[in-house]
Image (cartoon, helix red, strand yellow):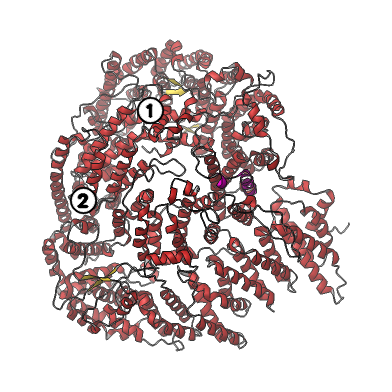
Amino acid sequence: MDDDHDEELSVSDTPGEANELSPFEKQKASLQTYLDSLPYQCESVEEMQQKLEFIVGRIFVCAKAKNWQMLTTWDGMLQCWMLMRYPIVKTTRAKLVRLYYELSITPGIEARVIRNWADMLSRLLANKAGMIRKLEPADLQLPWQPLWRALQKEIWPKKRTQDNTRNVINLLFYVADQCKRYFPASEIPLMLETFIPLTTKETILVMVPVFASFLPPTHIHLYVPTLFKLWEAFNSSAIDDRLLDVAGELSETHIAGKAGDAGEGGAEWKDIGIWTQAQWDILVGKGLLSMGVPVGVRSSSATAQHADGMAGGTGLKIKKPVNRLSSFALILIFSMAIDGPVRESATSTPKGRLPEHTGYIAGSRSLESLDKLVTSTESFFHPSNSGPWTLALTTFIHRLTCEFIRRVKEEELDTCKVPVTRRLTPSIRRAFVTILRTPALLAMFSKDAVSASYAQGALRNLSYLESNLIMPELLERAYNGLEVVNETHRTTAVLNILSGISRPLVTERLWLGGQKHLVPLLELCIPGIDLNDPAKTICTTMFVISAIQHIKIGDLSTSPSGISHPGDQGMEMMTTDDGGDRIPDGTELGSGVTLSLEEERVLVRDSTASFADWVTSLFRRVFALYENLPEEGGKKNTTGGKQEESVLKSIKSMLDVVCLHLSDSLFDLVLNQVHNYATTNAKSNAVRAFGQLIACLARVKPDLVIRKFLPYCKRVIEEELRHGASSVRTTSQHAAVPSDTTLHWNMAILRGCLGYGGATLLKYKEDILEIVTLLVEKTKGERGYSSTGRLITRILHTLAGVYPYNSRFVNTDEWNDPAFNSDHNIRWGRLYEPSDVQIEWHMPTDDEISFVITILENIAKPAINKVEGLIAATAQWDSVERNDFCRYLTAIRSTWMGLPTFLKEQTKVVPSPCVNEDVEVAELLVSHLDVQAGFTLEDPEDPRYQTVAALRSRFGDLLKRAARALRQGTEEEDHTDAVIAVTKSIDVYLLEYGTSRGNFNALQKAYTQARDLNRMWPKQRDNSRLVMIRRAQVYHSGRVYMHATYRRRSELDDKLLCELVELSLSPYTRVRRHAQSVLHDVCGYYIRSTRYVLPNLFSALAKGNDPDRIKGALYVLWNKGIAAYALSDLGFHDKYLVSLLECQHEEKPSIQKLVNSLAQDCLSNLNEESFHTDAYIMDTPRVDEALGDLEEEFSSTFVDHELLVMALDKASKRVRLRTSIYNGTISSILDIASRPTTHWRYVQMATRFLSGLLRRDTATPPDVAKFLLEQSLSPQPTIRAHAQRAVVRLLAFIKMRTYSKSELELWFDEWQNPLREDIAISDAASFLADLNKPIGSSDNVLYVDKTRTGFLAWTPSVKAYRPSQPESTTAWDPTSQECIQSMTHIVEGEQFFRNLALLWSQETSKNGGIIDLRLDNVAFVKSLAKTFEGRCLDNCLATIEPLLSDSDNFKQRAGAELLAGVIRGSKHWPPHLVNKLWEWTKPKFDKILSQIKPDTLPFWEGVVTYLLHDRDARRNQPLVDWILNLPLEFYGDSAFSMSKSLALFGILLDSLGRRLNHKADHYVKLFLDHADTSYAEMRTHICHCLYALVKNQWQPTYPSTQALLQACEEENDPLHIREAKYMEIVAGVLKKLDEWRDKRLPPPRVSQSEYDKIGLTVLQWIWGSAHGGQACLVFPYILPMMPEILRMSELNDSSELQNYSSAVLYVLSAVSPPPEYVEGIVDNFVTAAKSSTSWRIRLHALPALVVFFYRHLLSIAPSDAAKVMDILLDCLSDENVEVREMASRVLSGVIRCSQRQSIIPLKNRFVELARRTTIPPRRDPKYSESLRSLHSAILGLCALIESLPYSVESWVPPLTEVLAPHATDPPPISTTIRKCASEFKKTHQDTWHKDQLMFNEDQLQSLSTMLVGTSYYA
């Protein structure tokens, strides 16, 4: 029922004159094009409105009665109604959206139901990208606060009840995304007031999606500056995804500015589109980083993802399928406009500096950015340079072209609101195509098929935009690719691209000059049909299809042309280039000769003379392929494997299109050619394939084909049968008998002939009836009678089906027009509006109906009689009877397979409606949507109807008796084929009605693909006639499909269902599997069929059943749909679970494995919300309000009040029944689990079931609580783990019920502890100061555990807790007292904690030997401590004491887990108990620390983290004080001893955050003063602490949200990321480093030097910071460090220092620094390279510089680029050869990226230098200087050549004559030249056939000399 595929023309299909109509009238006009395309009368809008009213009325009743499960079935009906495409009044649609919005945020509803409602909401809104919206904000306003309220529970879930598999958070974000446009823009300030204070460093990954999903896309000036400042401050891949997505959406939404739909809410135009220059730099920088292109030595763009991984938390659960590159493409395209001066030619500056560009390409800054981007990445598009980035790059250019063409087309519409001055201009369009042409042409040959397809899609779009620029290039490659037969990859790529550009190729209006190439190209691709290369064959057929579907294959060369076409004059105008926009010389390859329209047409007409030869060659090639096919056979009777089947399918599609478009003379030619082949051959391997070929011919001219083939086939078949063909009786598939080949060959031909034609068959009905009767009687082999069955099905479908025919590219009257036939080339590529297409449908006539009934009477009826006779004696069957049964049943089945729409079902009597009258209302059961669908016989009074219906009933009754007879006493192996035949027949009887979901979806998919192939943009109205026919076919199929869904069951249907169930439990696997497949399908179509069959399935699981029956039942119950239904059904929920638990009686391992899988899978359906959804008792005032508004939209009879009263009455009964079933289920499960005989695996299963059945709204039975607590001491680790988690949930629910004042509080997690107090934040500074006040210093002290605010601004109040009163104990929920009591007895027992500790102390082998803290264990003890408070304290402490000092690591861990749980659980204990606990614990700290070993450190770190995280430090004051008092040593003997203290201090820093900021200065100084520690692990800890201290200090808090918003708008650094508080301390360290560098120790003691130790510490700090979320904070410190870092990179004697310094230089490129730092970093690189005396520094600086240069390409100022070029030119003449070569490589990259305007001046400079430099003899003092000077010139020239590796510019060939004379010079000159030549050869080998034309003979010789040197003999 998914109508997403068919959204294409929903409103935009309207005729031209409908533009002034209202939206409703537009939709009616659109609908009319659908209705007019059908051959039968459809319902009026008024009739369908009544049906809508009925459906919505039922939805109203279900919603009022809170029967949510029933409501979802009516949602399905509403979807069905919408599939019919009838218009919905805007107000009605808006109110339906409001209803589903309110339903989606109703608390306590299970996720599956919410997903349905969210989907319905999306369908009603239909907010598809690029499509016209159904509702505007003026039509609908939704409140955002209720959704935010629901979302908060998911964003910040309660840890103890958190379910990691739960996905409601993404559903609610999806709802927000769909609805944000309809949130009032006036609410934006309130949203910001709400969201901004909640945004902190920890919550940023959660809050950015909130901003993105809630803020309406209007009035963006209110929030965009703040979002960009946040974006700049955080290093996060998730944030990049979301904000690029938002920016793309906003760019498109506000393309028209204030003239657009948003009106005054529209954005103002700024520097580039709606963005400022600073914002644009961020956007383009992020987009460039997204490409993942590895410029330089390494790719280092992963720090953002690493930072997200470190952040963890809920933010990582929030998923949205964001395509960054699509968003980036939107940003670029929708920001294009003339917004700057047009670029002028670059000229040299007076001072001789290199030239700089002035202005922008076509006057567009966005286009300029795109040009830089594409230029810089161009070389990575080449196939030889492919990698993971290829897909990203090709996706990007494809999306660019799609969005550009969409914008172009939208701006051509009269309704376009974009001001003319902001629209795309011809010069922008031409420049855009020119920029993307080269990369797309390079990438079309990508090794990766997906990347190649994107590149080909881009070229297709570009060819529509500027065909003159693209098509000649493509054709040149096409001819080369098709002529070179040994490069398959190039051939397939060329064929694929030809398929994509077939319309411009054949349509003179799109490109004048393409049509004449069609026939030569078709001739060249005939060799592509090759069975040995399936991929190439499929590509060939695709090209032939895509080209031929737009033309007529007819010879025009001999007939004179008619009168000039009326559109010719316009064509002449269109194809003439205006002078102002000519293509520059040299950009267009090929002949360059432009012919007139008349000359082109003459050439095209002449070329069509070759059509006859091409067609005959094509068919010969196809015959040759058929002859080489593998033999048919196998289980599915296929020809070969999947590849061969795909080839045959594509060949059939090709022949279909070719035959359809043949002229009469060519059709006769082909028909004779095929007839000759058919009558002189019979190939066993091509039977099926040849039949398909005949069908292709018959589809075009059925009468001619039948007349040609039927007599011959009839004669041969009769003769073959007379001579014993197919006389060997078989009932199963087998290899073909060679002697039967001729029979099957002719049967296939016959099947092809009779597959089309409809009424044509009536002329031959006697022959047809005679031959079919003969075949039914005489074909006894399985292959023979199966073929006969297919023949019967085809004949009946041809006669009785409703289908369109004649899908040529023009309407039939035009096709038959003599004027068209003499000039059809003018109409090639014709597209149609929906209203212009005349579709010819086949509708059965009375004569055809009579013939169908005759066939039924003469074929089906006698067969039924025979089968009935055979059933009577199944026990005595031999092989003859069994064969007769199978073949006659196949004939009967085949007749009904061909008649799915012949008989319309009438209202059935339903003997077993499966309705529980006590709690269900039968009238609320859905039934199918009864719409007109072209059924042949609809009137039950019609005698013909009665005849056919009686026969069909006999067929059903026969199947029932056959199934029963075969099952009772005769179910043996011999009868398997017979049973399978019966199962297939039941499938046909029950499901071969209307059309299936699979067929409908396949039709939709085929239509969508065909539609998208021919259209340029989503709103395109016209398309090919074939697509319009498919569109009508899909619409017709949708109507038919309505009758196939929601079908009722008759008595016979029920009996057949029972038989299917029995067959699904068969002892034979083959039977079982087939029957199960059919049963699953049937349950999806018939109402309540699942409920009907479940009792039989559960009884099959009972003890005493055969193992095969049990296995069969389990497989059926494992089906997702059946399992979900059974577990949500009131009657079967308990049976499902209990039946699984009772399966332990069967010991077969396969069954036990199956039971385990079922139990695992059903857990997703066991959650508290599923029970609450079924028995919903909460008030829903907002839903009721939405229902009340909806009621106003319809008539007074809209609500059936009697039904509503009945439903409300049943609702309360349903709640009571659900509660009793729930209690019964728990009791039954507990009973089984408690039996002593129950196996431990089943106890585990029961424990998991009970855990899933726990509920927050109902007290847990005491027995369950007791059982779960007892199982937490189970010796089985898995049972114990599940039981512990269950106890944690159980106790958390008790707490929730205790503190909740209402159901809403309970389900929204809004309950409050009585100790809670909210502190109003009036003075943030004093509030923060109070947090550090000791507890005893004031009477009114409050604990503040979590402060999820105060980073940017403060919430009005902060949650805090009062300390507990002395001797006070919590009064838990009264309904849970028994439960608590039952648990108390166990917990207070002396042995409980000892036994627990004993089990937890066992050694585990998981985690590869790492002993981590097990948080589940800690949470378990914490929950017990919270609930039972001090009652268990003494026993627990007594157990812990010996464990803590035990030398066994595992026992120590058990003690640590117990202690952590008790301390964490003591949060609200009375003070005397808390004091007692700390008094016991405090003395243990030192001992614990002293005995921590490397392998126990991880869990002790875990304990401290667990205790301090999200807790007020004063709750853990003893622990905090102890850690703060630990001596921080840096120079001791034991690194591990010292690192323990530092590790604990680091945890304290992370946990306490800003609360330690008052001591931060001291610690920063301390750590930097001791950065010279000798131990690597100590340095790691110091770096972590420094990172944490700097991060904690970053608190850019503002007094209010408004103040922040204002600062973000006005200030450059509102978030203070450019402030470096500790710069003085760092500067001091750097100063010392300068001194210490000279005092470094010699190797091997160099690592002990102060310089090395401090250097490593500083480098690790930067490296670690750059990989965190707050990477920007380290940039202020990096700039002054850079000179020293660069100096460190030269130190060869310290590999660690060198590696870290290089890594830090590269990591600068992996993070986006604030723009001010870009210039400073470039300056540092340049200065280091310029002023350093060490060549090694230059060697390391240059590659890092080029990576940085590339990553920040668009934000580097021209002056900085000039500096980079200058230093590279200086380095080219460096004394060190390695530096020179590195400078050459870097220069090549920089020129390629951004300095192409400098090529000619540089070339002249280098040539001049090379010519004036001569190398003197080696002994000459000037030898070295001359060699270096010449080498620099040669390197410069080589860099220029390599800067454009895949093209040959006009200046390249002359350079060979400069370089060649030096090819024999001393190294390194000669080696540089050879290397350059070798690289040139490699990169140009693909295009050398064209590139070599750029060189003259001397230059080619020079190139050869460069490559190999001068010959010895020369």
Residue 284 is one of the magenta-drawn residues: no
Give left or right: position of 237 versus 1277: right
Which one is nearer the viewer's eye here, 1852 or 210? 210
**Residue visible at 14% across and 37% down?**
917
Give left or right: position of 704 versus 1120: right
Q: Is residue 790 visible?
A: no
Q: Is residue 437 visible?
A: yes
Q: Main secondary structure of the magenta part?
A: helix
Q: Position of residue 1719 (x, y in %)?
A: 60, 69
Residue 731 image label: 1
Which structural element holds mark 2? helix
Tell me how far mark 1 sits from mark 2, CA to CA: 51 Å
Q: Position of residue 1028 (x, y in %)?
A: 48, 29
Q: Is residue 614 above or below residue 1283?
A: above
Which structural element holds mark 1? loop
- The residue segment tinted magenta is 420-438
Q: Position of residue 1513 (x, y in %)?
A: 30, 78
The local crowd at label 2, few if under 14, some if 14 to 19, many if 20 or more residues have their Cα within 10 Å, is: many
Which one is nearer the viewer's eye here, 1198 or 71? 1198
Q: Earlier in the sequence, mark 1 or mark 2?
A: 1
Q: Is residue 1030 above or below residue 385?
A: above
Whether label 1 touches label 2, CB < 8 Å: no
Which one is nearer the viewer's eye here, 1112 or 254? 254
Q: Position of residue 491 (x, y in %)?
A: 63, 40
The amino acid pointed to by label 2 is Phe
Q: Which residue is mark 2?
A: 1171
Assign the N terminus to one quadrant of the image: top left
The local crowd at label 1, few if under 14, some if 14 to 19, many if 20 or more residues have their Cα within 10 Å, is: many
The amino acid pointed to by label 1 is Thr
